[in-house]
């Protein structure tokens, strides 16, 4: 698990942000041996926000049903011979 203490985070904030940005990662922030917060790469955060959107989740479920029914286009049907 990716856990960092508040003291280490405070002393290494710039380097920590660089690491999270590069790896599309997250860190759990602990204070007094309890996880209190999370530091998350912006791309991962946006993905998490998208998952909480009910319209987005509904569209995923619809797409899965269509796929299971065989109601989809192949790559060549969509893009032809590129």
Image (cartoon, rainbow, N blue to C red):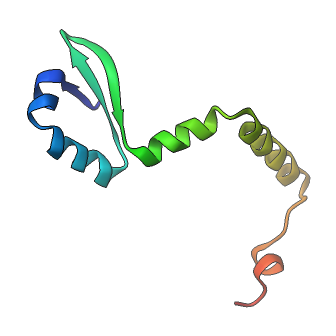
Does residue 80 appear left or right of residue 21 in this picture? right
> Residue 37, located in which quarter of the rendered image?
top left
Q: Along the line of sight, which residue is nearer the eye, 59 or 64?
A: 59
Q: How many marks?
A: 0
Query: What is the residue that sits farthest to the left in this orientation?
Result: 11
**Point 78% across, 80% down: residue:** 76
Give the residue furthest to the bottom: 81
Q: Could you say which quadrant of the image residue 56 lies in?
A: top right
Query: In which quadrant will I find the N terminus?
Result: top left
Residue plotted at (79% across, 47% down): 64
The relative height of residue 66 versus residue 12 in the rendered view (above or below) is below
Nearest the camera: 42 or 82?
42
Position of residue 47 measured from the top left corner of the image (x, y, whole percent): 54, 43
In the shown orientation, is residue 14 left or right of residue 37? left
The percent coordinates of residue 61 (x first, y second) are: 79, 40
Q: Relative to 44, is 33 on the left or the right?
A: left
Q: Is residue 72 above or below residue 30?
A: below
């Amino acid at each position: 698990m990716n856990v960092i203490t508040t003291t280490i985070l405070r002393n290494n904030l710039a380097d920590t942000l660089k690491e999270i940005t590069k790896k599309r990662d997250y860190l759990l922030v602990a204070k007094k041996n309890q996880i209190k917060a999370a530091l998350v790469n912006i791309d991962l955060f946006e993905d998490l926000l998208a998952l909480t959107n009910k319209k987005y989740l509904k569209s995923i479920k619809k797409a899965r049903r269509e796929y299971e029914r065989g109601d989809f286009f192949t790559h060549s049907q969509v893009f032809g011979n590129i």
